[in-house]
Image: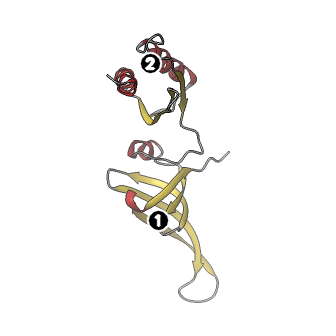
């Protein structure tokens, strides 16, 4: 069994025990430095990272193969990658760059296996007369058309 497969198996076992957590990224470099990025349905706290780190370390033998281990949560400014992340952020504002390089900043109102739905208000010229009016806009985007989506944090 390769070192990578041992790490993947240990991580899989840990995540089965903690179904609220899910893997965003796993990298292992040539020097056996393991970088794990997690997210969770209710976020990831420091204790989650500590627990995952300890459980993975217990399943690996440093005598057999020396390694470094870093477990972190997906940052606020990190782009969304998985459908589960979109679902978790329904009701929040996203900044989405499409494959056509259009940028949309809007509320995420729906996310499923096919794509997302965004809604926002825009000021547009009135159809009749002078001035502008506020209109509700909505767009359905398949994941294949999303280049990057980031949650907009507002205080």
Q: As displayed, is residue 125 above or below residue 76?
A: below
Residue at the limit of the structure toward the bottom, as seen here: 129
Which quarter of the figure has residue 144?
bottom left
Which disc, if any, is residue 99?
Answer: 1
Q: Depth check: give the residue in front, 15 or 69.
A: 69
Callout 1: SS: loop
Q: Is residue 75 left or right of residue 16?
A: right
Callout 2: SS: helix
Which disc, if any, is residue 110?
Answer: none
Q: Depth check: give the residue in front, 11 or 118.
A: 11
Query: Comparing marks 1 and 2, which lies closer to the viewer?
Result: 2
Can you give x and y, in whole percent of width and height, for residue 123 in the image?
60, 73
> Which class describes the residues within 10 Å of circle 2: few (<14), some (14-19), or many (20+)?
many
Can you give x and y, in whole percent of width and height, for residue 147 in the image?
48, 59
Which quarter of the figure has residue 145?
bottom left
Q: As displayed, is residue 155 above or below residue 4?
A: below
Q: Is residue 111 left or right of residue 155?
A: left
Residue for badge 2? 56
Q: Dividing the image into 4 quarters, which one contains the C terminus? A: top right
| Residue name at image x 44 percent, y 18 percent | 56
| Residue name at image x 46 percent, y 65 percent | 99
Can you give x and y, in whole percent of width and height, for residue 98 in the image?
48, 64
| Residue name at image x 59 percent, y 42 percent | 76
Distance from disc 1 to disc 2, alpha carbons, whole Å, reads: 38 Å
Earlier-in-chain disc, 1 versus 2: 2
> Which class describes the residues within 10 Å of circle 1: few (<14), some (14-19), or many (20+)?
few
Q: Depth check: give the residue in front, 2 or 45.
A: 2
| Residue name at image x 50 percent, y 19 percent | 53
Say whether marks 1 and 2 touch (CB < 8 Å): no
Q: Dividing the image into 4 quarters, which one contains the N terminus? A: top left
Q: As displayed, is residue 89 above or below residue 99?
A: above
Q: Depth check: give the residue in front, 13 or 30.
A: 30
């Amino acid at each position: 069994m390769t070192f990578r497969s041992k790490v993947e198996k240990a991580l899989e076992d840990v995540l089965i025990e903690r179904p609220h957590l899910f893997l965003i990224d796993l990298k292992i470099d040539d020097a056996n430095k393991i970088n794990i990025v997690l997210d969770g349905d209710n976020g990831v706290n420091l204790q989650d990272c500590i627990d995952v780190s300890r459980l993975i370390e217990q399943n690996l033998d440093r005598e057999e193969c020396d390694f470094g281990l870093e477990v972190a949560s997906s940052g606020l400014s990190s782009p969304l990658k998985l459908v589960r992340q979109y679902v978790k952020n329904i009701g929040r504002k996203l900044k989405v760059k499409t494959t056509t390089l259009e940028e949309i900043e809007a509320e995420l109102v729906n996310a499923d296996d096919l794509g997302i739905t965004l809604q926002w208000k825009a000021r547009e010229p009135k159809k009749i007369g002078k001035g502008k009016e506020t209109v509700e806009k909505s767009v359905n985007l398949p994941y294949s058309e999303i280049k990057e989506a980031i949650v907009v944090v507002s205080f």
